Image (spheres, rainbow, N blue to C red):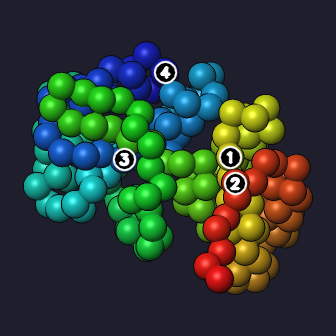
Amino acid sequence: MDRNRLEEIVHALGDRLEGEWLLLGGAVVALWLEPRRTTEVVDVIGFGGTAAERHALMELAVGLGLPVEAINSAADFFVFRIPDWREQVEVFYQGARSVVYRPSPTLFLLLKIRRLSAQDFTDCLALLAKARKGALELDVQRLTAAIDALAPTEDAALRERRARLREALASCPSKAIDVPE
């Protein structure tokens, strides 16, 4: 799906469904970071993680002429493991019936770091390029700690991507972190 189709899906999500939704993955990259990016699947989750939300997403897909598997809500498994994820979202589209959010730059990277496929790495670099231009702030300390906490891997390419991402983070602006006294 290209940018135009993804915009149509996001607008339908905000205008036809009730609730709060978090757009993730390749769709958010194409609409926010890299307009040439395409994706086969739209990763979107409901804030409640309910079966009713999943069903509504499937109905929306069918209504848009898409197969139900074109909209994936399985990312909630990973999102809900991040304790402050709700504080790490930003309004992306205010629809007539609901709000569609995107992850903050820090949440975006936290969600990509664990798997860090070649495409994930490319997506992370697109976000870091935007951050370096001053448009985004990152919690570099938190992200570096997340990379350092990953289990070792036998995959040499993955090890290299992790090291390169860690190195790239060092050149990005970091938000100030309030440390309790």
Dot placed on the residue nearer the N-terminal end, 3 or 2: 3
Residue contact at pointers 2 and 1, CB within 8 angstroms: yes
Count residues near mark 2 (Cα–Cα under 10 Å), then give few for <14, some for 14-19, many for 20+: few
Dot placed on the residue nearer the N-terminal end, 4 or 2: 4
Q: Secondary structure at mark 1?
A: loop
The residue positioned 45% from the left and 67% from the top of the image is: 84
Q: Is residue 32 visible?
A: yes
Residue on which disc 2 sits: 175
Count residues near mark 4 (Cα–Cα under 10 Å), then give few for <14, some for 14-19, many for 20+: many
Q: Is residue 127 visible?
A: no
| 137 vs 128, nearest the viewer | 137
Q: Tell whether 165 sits left or right of 32.
A: right
Badge number at residue 137: 1
Q: Tell whether 173 sits left or right of 120.
A: right
What type is the residue that disc 3 sits on? Leu
The Cα atoms of the two marked residues, 3 and 2, are separated by 23 Å
What type is the residue that disc 2 sits on? Lys
Quadrant location, the C terminus = bottom right
